[in-house]
């Protein structure tokens, strides 16, 4: 259990739930039933401090970034800065944001992805090319093993976004680098409390730029907000893959997925898990809270209004798709979101829907299933094989990492990798060495 600093309480996301009533059989779906015991903190109200100064900072930061990028040859973050044409940006009605560098001494603004660069001149521990950095981390975490084999494929066109459940988890960035940087040249870390991240960067002497987004304050909206803000940047990514800080991906299986479709886990289609709008209480206890039932009814109501009164084509198409896929007008599906891929070609409908979700403060675990249900099926959606582990099953996560999975949740880096011999062997000898 975690508390935020300064005594502020943070909600504990659904992905941290523990269930008593589990199906233990390997390979069978783990279904949460009505006996779920959940320990939560109430969500603190979202404090909006939107970016009054961002535009001013932008120009200066863009110049700094241009300088930085032109000087570094081995930059790990390969995000390309956009063209610096202030004139154009000011006259464009929908300008994208150029990549900037966050101030180290001042606070990091909300909602603006940018680079955090360790100011310490002694921060050379993890400096160098991606291969150098990853091999150094590997030698440190897996002593006695050789260098890592080259990977067979990479995803330069996909931005990997890691959502941190809690700022305390910033201490696993090296693990994430080790697992994913070879495949994803571009990783955006998204979370709260940038000051905690800065401390971690200094403590671990991370010498490479950390691409970072200071997320908004409500855990239940952070995930779709991370993608939403990433989509505002000037870049050429063809897709955005968001994962949790404890999601373990099988890269071979991910490589085979259709990147032109939106992707989420297949759990709710396999199990049919849903909430019924005629009821207030459910095992998923957020149904009755802000972001649950009333938010979903608000979103649906507004979509119907726009479709009927405003003749809004996006709303009409969304509702048509939605009701041709969802088989009951009073249910909403729900699922823990530890993996979400959105191709750029679907960004307009994604942004359209997430702006509605934000308006009603919709909880991500009902919002995202709703979003994918309203896409064209099966043309725009792919449900990936995945497994969510609960309770004791979490002690040996790696045992459940079956060959057909695209991802498993959770794999905790300190508990399962650093401090568990079986987990460490799995990582050092199997996972990291598979090609
Ligand atoms: C780092 O900077 C400090 C003060 O700015 C200076 O005294 C020190 O010599 C520098 N160290 C190196 C290795 O450059
Ligand atoms: C995106 O790609 C186009 C064409 O290759 C290029 O001209 C442009 O500079 C790129 N933009 C960014 C932000 O990398
Ligand atoms: C939802 O609840 C209503 C009554 O409250 C019931 O008639 C209906 O069958 C339920 N729908 C589903 C899919 O469980
Ligand atoms: C609704 O029913 C159709 C046809 O039986 C099925 O293909 C689809 O997966 C169902 N939708 C959901 C969300 O379960
Ligand atoms: C990933 O999946 C492939 C099959 O697609 C399998 O051969 C491989 O062993 C899996 N990797 C791990 C680390 O389990």
Image: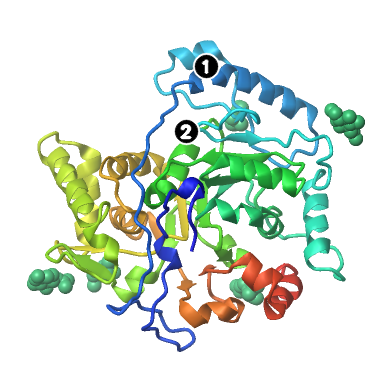
Give the vertical position of 160 relative to 65 (above or below).
below
In the rendering, which numbered label is found on residue 56?
1
Where is residue 43? Give x, y as percent. Answer: 35, 52
* Residue receiving disc 2: 232
Where is residue 86? Give x, y as percent. Answer: 54, 13
Earlier-in-chain disc, 2 versus 1: 1
Residue at 46 percent of width and 76 percent of height: 390
Give the vertical position of 197 relative to 27 (above or below).
above
Residue at 75 percent of width and 33 percent of height: 119
The residue carrying pointer 2 sits among few (fewer than 14), some (14 to 19) or many (20 or more) residues within 10 Å by Cα, namely some
Q: In the image, is 224 to the left or to the right of 134?
A: left
- Ligand 3 sits in quadrant: bottom left
How many marks do you count on the picture? 2
Tell me if I can see residue 325 in this picture. Answer: no
Q: Give whichever of 348, 177 is nearer the camera.
A: 177
Whether ligand 2 has any atom under 8 Å from the Cβ at mark 1 is answered as: no
In the rendering, which numbered label is found on residue 221?
none
Residue placed farthest to the bottom in the image? Answer: 25
Figure quadrant of the C terminus: bottom right
Q: Are marks 2 and 1 in contact (CB under 8 Å)?
A: no
The quadrant where residue 249 appears: bottom right
Residue placed farthest to the top in the image? Answer: 87
How far is the residue under mark 2 from the one under mark 1? 17 Å
Where is residue 204? Give x, y as percent. Answer: 74, 49
Residue at 46 percent of width and 23 percent of height: 95
Tell me if I can see residue 85 in this picture. Answer: yes
Q: Give whichever of 116, 387 is nearer the camera.
A: 116
Where is residue 423? Give x, y as percent. Answer: 67, 76
Per the image, label 1 sits on a secondary structure element best described as helix
């Amino acid at each position: 259990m975690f508390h935020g600093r300064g005594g502020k309480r943070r909600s504990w996301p659904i992905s941290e739930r523990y269930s008593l009533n589990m199906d233990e059989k390997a390979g069978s779906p783990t279904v949460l039933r009505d006996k779920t015991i959940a320990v939560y903190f109430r969500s603190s109200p979202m404090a909006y401090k939107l970016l009054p100064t961002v535009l001013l900072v932008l120009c200066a930061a863009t110049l700094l970034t241009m300088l930085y990028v032109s000087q570094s040859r081995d930059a790990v973050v390969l995000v390309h800065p956009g063209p610096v044409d202030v004139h154009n940006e000011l006259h464009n009605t929908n300008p994208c944001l150029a990549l900037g560098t966050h101030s180290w001494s001042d606070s990091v603004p909300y909602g603006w992805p940018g680079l955090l660069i360790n100011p310490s001149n002694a921060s050379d521990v993890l400096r160098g090319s991606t291969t150098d950095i990853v091999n150094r981390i590997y030698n440190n975490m897996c002593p006695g093993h050789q260098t890592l084999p080259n990977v067979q494929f990479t995803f330069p066109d996909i931005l990997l976004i890691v959502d941190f459940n809690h700022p305390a988890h910033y201490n696993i960035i090296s693990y994430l680098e080790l697992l994913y940087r070879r495949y994803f040249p571009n990783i955006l870390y998204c979370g709260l409390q940038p000051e905690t991240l800065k401390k971690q960067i200094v403590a671990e002497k991370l010498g490479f730029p950390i691409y970072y987004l200071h997320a908004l304050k409500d855990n239940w909206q952070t995930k779709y907000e991370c993608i939403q803000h990433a989509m505002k940047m000037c870049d050429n990514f063809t897709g955005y893959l968001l994962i949790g800080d404890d999601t373990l991906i099988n890269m071979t299986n991910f490589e085979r997925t259709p990147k032109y479709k939106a992707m989420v886990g297949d759990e709710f289609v396999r199990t049919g898990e849903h909430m019924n709008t005629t009821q207030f209480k459910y095992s998923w206890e957020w149904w009755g809270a802000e972001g649950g039932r009333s938010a979903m009814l608000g979103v649906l109501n507004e979509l119907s209004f726009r479709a009927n009164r405003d003749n809004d084509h996006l709303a009409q198409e969304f509702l048509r798709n939605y009701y041709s896929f969802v088989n009951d007008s009073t249910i909403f599906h729900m699922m823990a979101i530890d993996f979400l891929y959105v191709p750029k070609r679907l960004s307009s409908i994604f942004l359209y829907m997430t702006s509605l979700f934000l308006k009603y403060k919709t909880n991500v675990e009902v919002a995202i299933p709703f979003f994918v249900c309203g896409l064209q099926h099966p043309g725009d959606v792919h449900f990936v094989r995945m497994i969510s582990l609960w309770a004791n099953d979490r002690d040996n996560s790696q045992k459940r990492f079956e060959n057909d999975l695209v991802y498993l949740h959770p794999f905790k880096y300190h508990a399962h990798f650093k401090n568990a011999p079986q987990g460490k062997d799995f990582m050092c000898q199997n996972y990291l060495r598979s090609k």
